[in-house]
Amino acid sequence: MEGLYHELRRRSSEAARAMVRKVLQSNGGNVSKTARILGVSRKTVRRAREGPLEDLSRRPKRSPRRTRREFEGLIVAEAKRTGYRYLRLHHYLRRKYALEISPWTIKAILRRGGVPQKRRRVRRGRRPLYDYEHLLPFEQLQLDTKWILIRRACLGRSTSISRGMGFRSTSGP
């Protein structure tokens, strides 16, 4: 019977608690013996004995910081109308309605509102290979700029990068 409770619990919590109550009754109400037979803790046996058979709701009784329903309706409607997802929608709502709502809150609202996520296109096939063997001399130049900076620093020369025009030596031999 070891592990039977957990297996049964995955399928039906009511059936698992009913089984615990039957085993408890057959053992004369001995909680420790029942827990050992079923392979569960004594606390689980006591909960099954004293609590209801069905699971209790885990939903909070109240949510004082929840976004108002009018705003949620507006967010879902704008998302469906514009086709924007949470990040672009966050900026759009801030500009148009002056709503300061976090993008992550908007993401949760869209999920609750049933707005489907856009499917990202995935490129099928391989990235084309670049044929380095058939290049003409000096047709392509690859330069490791980090290595140049490190090399010049080791030689005692200071360098600066001037607006993408390359390197220029400011001092040194």
Image (cartoon, rainbow, N blue to C red):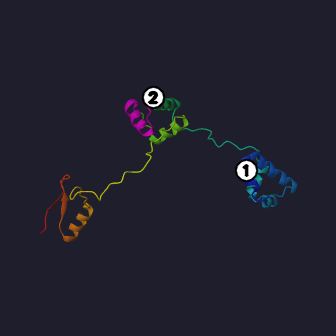
Residue sticking out furthest to the bottom: 155
Is 95 displayed left or right of 44 in the figure? left
Q: What number of labels is visible?
A: 2
Judge by depth and name the residue closer to the eye, 28 or 18: 18
Up-down relation of residue 155 to residue 118 (above or below) = below
Disc on res. 47: none
Q: Which tag, 1 or 2, sits closer to the chain's start?
A: 1
Judge by depth and name the residue closer to the eye, 78 or 149: 149
- Distance of mark 1 from mark 2, alpha carbons? 44 Å
Residue at numbered disc 2 = 81
Judge by depth and name the residue closer to the eye, 136 or 7: 136
> Which residue is located at x 27 percent, y 62 percent?
146
| Image location (x, y in percent) of residue 63 | 57, 38
> Which residue is located at x 26 percent, y 61 percent?
144
The quadrant where residue 90 appears: top left
Is 60 displayed left or right of 100 in the figure? right
| Image location (x, y in percent) of residue 69 | 53, 31
Q: Amino acid at mark 1?
A: Arg
| Quarter that holds the N terminus | bottom right
| Image location (x, y in percent) of residue 153 | 22, 67
Q: Amino acid at mark 2?
A: Arg
The secondary structure type at the circle numbered 1 is helix
Residue at numbered disc 1 = 9
> Closer to us: mark 1 or mark 2?
2
Residues shaded magenta: 80-98
Asked whether residue 138 is drawn in magenta, I would say no
- Circle 2: is it few (<14), some (14-19), or many (20+) Cα within 10 Å? few
Asked whether residue 95 is drawn in magenta, I would say yes
> Which residue is located at x 73 percent, y 54 percent?
6
